[in-house]
Amino acid sequence: MPSVVGVTGYTGLLGWHLRCALKAYGVERVRTADRDTFDHLENLSRFVDGCDTIVHLAGLNRGKPDDVEQSNVMLAERLVNALRIQRSTAHVIFSNSTQCDIDTPYGRSKREASDTLRRWSLECEASFTDLILPNVFGEGGRPFWNSAISTFCHQLANGQESRIIEDQEIELLHAQDVSAVIRRCMGDGHNGELRLPGRRISVSNVLQRLRNLSQEYVHGVIPELPSEFDRQLLNTFRSYYFTVQPRFNLALHGDERGVFAEIAKSKGEGQTSYSSTHPGITRGDHFHFRKLERFVVLSGKATIRLRRLFSNEIIALDVDGEQPVAVDMPTLFAHNITNSGPDELLTMFWADEIFDPSTADTFPEAVVL
């Protein structure tokens, strides 16, 4: 793996997911370039200097046609200028689009940007990966901008009606699947074009799947997830629903014997566990890429803290066994639980998969930095 990786467009959907993956898999030296970096050649030259690999994700896919066409080409040209100034032979991985085959302003701009980077790589005998991507979706996408999936999930989470403008077949690929390929390209120095296939599905079909998954989830049922694609859709929806409803109230059924509450109803497999925690002690400080994990405090008082990766904002939820609620951990959020009361804390945990140490999907990350 490279020792220094540069990422342009790091605040976008794919940029954020890639940075999460690099963090999880031990790439510690990651540089980022934003709009200000590209606006000043001196800054861009400093950015590329010393990078072994540059993942060029920055681009414009919406706006006035002329702006879109000019912007993507300009970004590639400026990056090449900086590479030439530094006499860099970094491996450049470019996030191209399947629309490069179509004669539209966006398609032409991606095609020309790719040609610009390819010509530079041939001049200096550097590796160049032309990564041609279908529609990318995933947690944290920007509604009404990144993809129809982001828009649908935002609308479903907020109780809004979703409308299909044109029902057509689309090709979908999750951002972490793309990140995994980028990491492999870094490792083997892939040179040349690489087209990534996605899941072909109609817009109406994927909207109906999201409706079915979300309806079960918001009513307390973990739906059956027959494929990784379904899991990715649910986790994408959960990233929006958590901002609206971070807790699930549990209905307590009491009589002279005591109380009873349903904690998790799942149509798939899963694992239940519990822990006791001494006062003042914190458990957790990790994150997951795929796992759905639920916390329920049964006895005592606790504070559950969450932080979206690469954000400084901490979400703190106070919970009490006297009024139990379920809190589901969003993927790509560092999370922990602290015994904030004077007594022993008893917590039940449920995950939607049986723990396997060889693929645990648990990566250390402190919530409080």
Image (cartoon, rainbow, N blue to C red):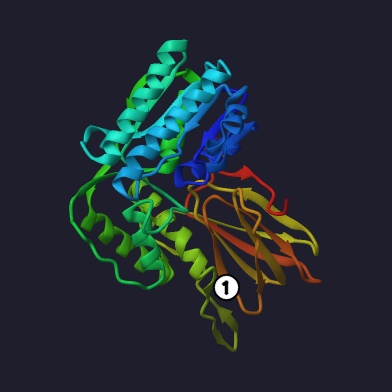
Picture quarter with the N terminus:
top right
Residue that appears at 50% across and 48% down: 354
Residue that appears at 60% across and 84% down: 257
Q: Mark 1 points at which residue?
A: 325
Viewer-side residue, 315 vs 59:
59
In the rendered picture of this protein, how many numbered marks are placed on residues?
1
Secondary element under disc 1, as helix, strand or loop, is strand
The percent position of residue 106, horizontal first and vertical second, equals 30, 40
- Measured along the vertical axis of the image, is residue 78 above or below residue 266? above
- Measured along the vertical axis of the image, is residue 343 above or below residue 74? below
Residue that appears at 49% across and 28% down: 79
> Could you tell whether 313 is left or right of 158 in the image?
right
- Measured along the vertical axis of the image, is residue 357 above or below residue 331? above
Viewer-side residue, 201 vs 193:
193
- Amino acid marked by disc 1: Val
Q: Quadrant for residue 48, please give it.
A: top right
